[in-house]
Image: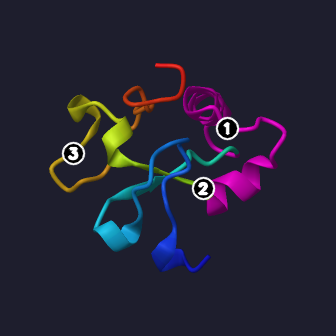
Amino acid sequence: MAASERGCCVPRCSKTRKDKTVLHSFPNPDKDMDRYIAWTRAVGLDTSLDPHYVYQNRRVCHAHFELKFLTWTRRLSHGAIPTLLLPGG
């Protein structure tokens, strides 16, 4: 899938960049493994996947983050963890 067609990796979420949806990369596992693990657990991602593969290839759309985690530039604040519209929620 081309980078421009990437979609949100959260199950049952069909948001993509084509929809003009902001997609956020997972935290870098080399810099913040605890937050990376929190993201994978929150979105129900297979934890056996290589963390570097996930960091480079999986995205979570902004619909899964509380407004308090979004900045006016549509970036995430440092401690952001997806909490909305998640599997099992």
Helix, strand, or loop for circle 2?
loop
- State the residue position of label 2: 58
Query: Identity of the amino acid at label 3?
Result: Thr
Query: Residue 28 at x, y = what percent?
Result: 61, 48
- State the residue position of label 3: 71
Looking at the image, residue 20 lies above or below residue 13: below
- State the residue position of label 1: 45
Picture residue at 25% right of the left edge, 41% below the top: 70
Disc 2 crowd rating (10 Å Cα; few below 14, some 14-19, many 20+) is some
**Nearer the viewer's eye, disc 3 or disc 2?**
2
Query: Identity of the amino acid at label 2?
Result: Arg
Is residue 33 in the magenta section? yes
Disc 3 crowd rating (10 Å Cα; few below 14, some 14-19, many 20+) is few
Query: Residue 25 at x, y = what percent?
Result: 51, 54
Helix, strand, or loop for circle 3?
loop
Q: Which residues are magenta?
A: 30-57
- First in sequence, mark 1 or 2: give its number: 1
Q: Which mark is residue 37?
A: none
Labelled pair 1, 2 in contact (Cβ < 8 Å): yes
Cα–Cα span, label 3 and label 1: 25 Å
